[in-house]
């Protein structure tokens, strides 16, 4: 079975940068799977009636499960790392996270792994860290000398041929905020300066048209209610702006994937 595995840091990352891609592959008959490093338990809370810091992680896990159902993601696992501290696990936690990732890669045997790249979409330390862990786990999963005890469990080494780093072209998010302002809405993106998002457009190697799956992507993004307050850009997104700004998803080829793609092409 063809499998796409997405590996991200927080509930909502998947819908924002890869929701259309996940929905598209699921519709094409692929198994789509998601590993989420944290439950986003220290993230913002859009509305105090939804959650507090006693139960935000639980609430966000529920939101993520709903988003996965919308996107057709049939397999979900948490790494149980702490929100905000993915970049600073102690040595044991790091080995445990790599083991869990490598085990899942060997079990699922994905053709494609999607994660964050060195830009972390907007420099978020957790995003950069999960991208590094996923990149290392991909190499480890293909190495027969790594975690040999997996062999006793019939989990053979597996090298995922394609690694894609999800991102956005610089300028996309500032333009969105400007267009919403023209329409009379002063909005924000989780309070992050929009110019921090993305990479120079020439660094993007792979663009997926996800227009046919836009409704699913938007529905999945909106399942993450605790993250969207009244002045969030997504709260004011019209259909027209959604098509323009979220009709495509953007990736950079990561790791040695370029070599493999070339080999496949020969
Ligand atoms: Zn995130």
Image (tube, rainbow, N blue to C red):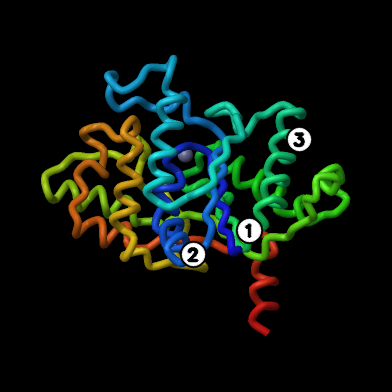
Q: Nearer the viewer, mark 1 or mark 3?
A: 1
Looking at the rendered structure, the secondary structure element under dot 2 is loop
The answer to which quarter of the image holds residue 18 is bottom left
The mark found on residue 229 in the picture is none
Q: CA distance from mark 3 to mark 2?
A: 33 Å
* Quadrant the N terminus occupies: bottom right
Q: Which residue is mark 3?
A: 95
- N-terminal of the pair, mark 1 or mark 3, is 3
Q: Which of the 4 image quarters holds residue 62?
A: top left
The reply, left or right, for residue 215 in relation to residue 248 is left
Q: Secondary structure at mark 1?
A: loop
- The x and y percentages for residue 15 are 41, 48
| Local SS, label 3 | helix
Residue 104 drawn at (x, y percent): 67, 46
Q: Position of residue 40 (x, y in %)?
A: 47, 30
Residue for badge 2: 29
Sequence-first disc among 3 and 2:
2
Give the spatial CA distance, label 1 vs label 3.
21 Å
Residue 126 pos. (x, y %)? 55, 37
Q: Nearer the viewer, residue 165 or 76?
A: 76
Residue at left offset 52%, top offset 46%: 120
Q: Residue furthest left?
A: 184
In the image, 106 versus 142, the foreground residue is 106
Q: Is residue 30 left or right of residue 239?
A: right
Asked whether, in this view, residue 3 is left or right of residue 142, the answer is left
Q: CA distance from mark 2 to mark 1?
A: 14 Å
Residue designated by label 1: 110
* Nearer-the-camera pick, 90 or 25: 25
């Amino acid at each position: 079975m063809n499998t796409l595995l997405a590996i991200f840091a927080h509930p909502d990352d998947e819908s924002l940068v890869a929701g259309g891609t996940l929905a598209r592959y699921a519709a094409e008959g692929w198994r789509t799977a998601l590993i989420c490093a944290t439950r986003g338990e220290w993230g913002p809370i859009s509305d105090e009636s939804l959650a507090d810091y006693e139960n935000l992680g639980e609430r966000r896990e529920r939101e993520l499960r709903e988003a996965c159902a919308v996107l057709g993601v049939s397999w979900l696992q948490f790494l149980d790392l702490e929100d905000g501290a993915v970049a600073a696990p102690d040595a044991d936690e790091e080995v445990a996270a790599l083991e869990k990732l490598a085990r899942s890669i060997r079990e699922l045997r994905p053709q494609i792994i999607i994660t964050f790249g060195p830009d972390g979409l907007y420099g978020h330390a957790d995003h950069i860290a999960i991208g590094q862990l996923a990149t290392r786990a991909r190499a480890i999963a293909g190495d027969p000398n790594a975690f040999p005890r997996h062999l006793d469990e019939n989990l053979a080494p597996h090298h995922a041929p394609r690694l894609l780093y999800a991102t956005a072209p610089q300028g996309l998010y500032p333009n969105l905020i400007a267009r919403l302002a023209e329409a009379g809405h002063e909005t924000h993106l989780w309070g992050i300066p929009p110019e921090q998002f993305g990479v120079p457009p020439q660094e993007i190697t792979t663009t997926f048209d996800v227009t046919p799956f836009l409704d699913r992507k938007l529905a999945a993004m909106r399942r993450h209610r605790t993250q969207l307050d009244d002045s969030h850009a997504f709260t004011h997104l019209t259909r027209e702006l959604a098509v323009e700004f979220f009709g495509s998803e953007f990736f950079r080829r990561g790791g040695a994937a370029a070599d493999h793609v070339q080999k496949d092409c020969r």
